[in-house]
Image (tube, helix red, strand yellow):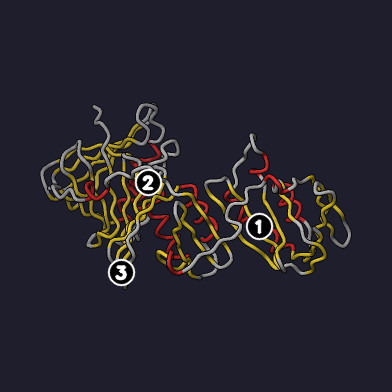
């Protein structure tokens, strides 16, 4: 390989695909970025076998074709510090990469690409397998509103986001059994039936790549056991989770709540942030906070080994008196997604039954939260 490319384009592409890479001591080549020339483009790939990210840049000058795999951290750090707009990449003996600028030559040991996985070399996506499309801004916002509930990396069935089509709706769901986040997106047309569980790792990589990027359409395809997210010249490919997802419809259909709190999102969040300072240091029950609703007031209590807090807030609470313990961190992670000028509603039944949380008069984004054991 002997080519000349734009330094910043090379650096940007490398940083995109490295988001799929995890350190692999058993097979070190999987800890690498793979690059390969094809026609007048330099193709980049990063993979951990479950998730793969591909992109490409234009080659300014092509002298000879080739492909290599390399550890990226030091190259990233080096390219960030040089000032030239263009760099020359030259490979000798298949094991040495020379990066040349106007006044310097650096040498890096690289891998021959023979052992690099060849999956997805020839991606052929067509309209028959297109599932849906939306802008990157909207897709990132949706995923950020549910991904926090998929915080169980040791449980494959839970460490994912469920996407299901229902007529003109898409459901996005995440749960760790202690809480469930649900969001419904309405489309103007029917969507072909499909239901997939997308690994949380892939969703987090997608958010990092697409958040703040130039506004454009993301097209989502499904082929066999893989889902493809295509944004401009970036393709994010993920192996789907095939373990059965919990029956979230049954959880959401519980309509037996008979107590309701209505409160300003800003007011409630302010209270929660203060009490979290005390509850997060509770060694016995981290983030446990007690809420008592009585005579139009909400009392909020939290403590740790050296301090405690007790706040009283005037609230609009309908129903019999109630005392319940909830994880304040879990509440904050949902409420921070609600505009602070809005009101939120929390529906309850008993001190040991689930709580339903949502923006007032808007139930297309719901949160179900299980209580903690009350302590004296």
Q: Do the residues labelled 2 and 1 touch (CB within 8 Å)?
A: no
Q: Residue at x 52, y 61 (%)?
A: 210
The residue most toward the bottom is 188
Q: Nearer the viewer, residue 304 or 72?
A: 72
Where residue 116 appears, as percent x and y from the top left, is 66, 47
Residue marked by disc 2: 149
Q: Residues within 10 Å of mark 2 (few under 14, many from 20)?
A: many
State the residue in front, 72 or 366: 72
348 versus 129 height, above or below: above
From the image, which quarter does the N terminus lie in? bottom right
**Residue 45: x percent and y percent?**
63, 54
Secondary structure of the residue carrying tag 2 is helix
Give the side of residue 180 with respect to residue 131, left or right: left
How far apart, in angstroms, are the residues tagged by discs 3 and 1? 36 Å
Q: Where is residue 352 in the image (x, y as percent from the top left)?
A: 20, 36
Question: Is 303 displayed left or right of 40 in the figure?
Answer: left
User: Considering only order in the chain, which callout, 1 or 2, is on the residue closer to the N terminus?
Assistant: 1
Nearer to us: label 2 or label 1: 1
Residue denoted by label 3 = 190
Q: How crowded is mark 1: few (under 14 residues within 10 Å), some or many (20 or more)?
A: many
Report how far apart the C-alphas of labels 3 and 2 lie in the structure: 28 Å
Residue located beneath label 1 in the image: 44
Residue 14 higher or lower than 38, as above or below: above
Give coordinates of residue 51: x percent, y percent: 53, 49
Q: What element carries label 3?
A: loop
At horizontal 34% and vertical 32% (from top left) the residue drawn is 303
Q: Are marks 3 and 2 in contact (CB under 8 Å)?
A: no
Q: How far apart are marks 2 and 1 (CA)?
A: 32 Å
Residue 89 sits in quarter: bottom right
Q: Residue at x 65, y 38 (%)?
A: 27
């Amino acid at each position: 390989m002997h080519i000349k490319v734009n330094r910043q384009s090379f650096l940007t592409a490398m940083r995109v695909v490295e988001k799929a890479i995890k350190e692999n001591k058993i097979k070190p080549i999987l800890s690498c970025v793979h690059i390969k020339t094809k026609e007048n483009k330099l193709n980049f790939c990063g993979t951990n076998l479950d998730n793969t990210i591909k992109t490409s840049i234009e080659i300014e000058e092509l002298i000879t074709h080739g492909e290599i795999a390399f550890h990226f951290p030091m190259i990233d750090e080096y390219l960030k510090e040089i000032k030239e707009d263009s760099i020359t990449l030259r490979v000798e003996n298949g094991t040495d990469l020379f990066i040349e600028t106007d006044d310097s030559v650096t040498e890096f040991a690289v891998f021959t690409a023979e052992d690099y996985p060849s999956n997805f070399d020839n991606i052929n996506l067509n309209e028959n397998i297109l599932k849906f499309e939306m802008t990157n801004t909207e897709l990132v916002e949706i995923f950020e509103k549910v991904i926090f509930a998929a915080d169980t990396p040791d449980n494959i069935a839970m460490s994912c986001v469920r996407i299901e089509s229902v007529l003109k709706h898409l459901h996005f769901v995440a749960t760790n059994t202690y809480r469930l986040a649900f969001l419904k997106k309405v489309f103007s047309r029917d969507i072909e039936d499909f239901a997939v569980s997308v690994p949380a790792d892939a969703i987090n990589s997608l958010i990092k790549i697409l958040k703040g990027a130039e506004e454009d359409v993301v097209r989502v395809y499904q082929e066999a056991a893989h889902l493809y997210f295509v944004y401009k010249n970036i393709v994010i490919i993920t192996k789907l989770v095939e373990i059965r997802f919990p029956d979230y419809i049954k959880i959401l259909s519980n309509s037996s709540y008979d107590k309701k709190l209505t409160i300003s999102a800003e007011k409630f969040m302010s209270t929660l942030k203060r009490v979290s300072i005390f509850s997060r240091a509770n060694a016995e029950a981290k983030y446990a906070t007690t809420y008592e609703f009585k005579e139009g007031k909400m009392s909020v209590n939290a403590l740790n080994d050296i301090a405690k807090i007790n706040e009283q807030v005037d609230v609009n609470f309908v129903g019999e008196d109630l005392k319940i313990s909830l994880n304040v961190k879990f509440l904050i992670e949902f409420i921070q997604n609600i505009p602070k000028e809005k009101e939120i509603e929390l529906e309850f039944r008993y001190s040991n039954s689930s709580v339903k949380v949502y923006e007032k008069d808007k139930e297309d984004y719901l949160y179900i939260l299980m209580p903690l054991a009350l302590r004296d």
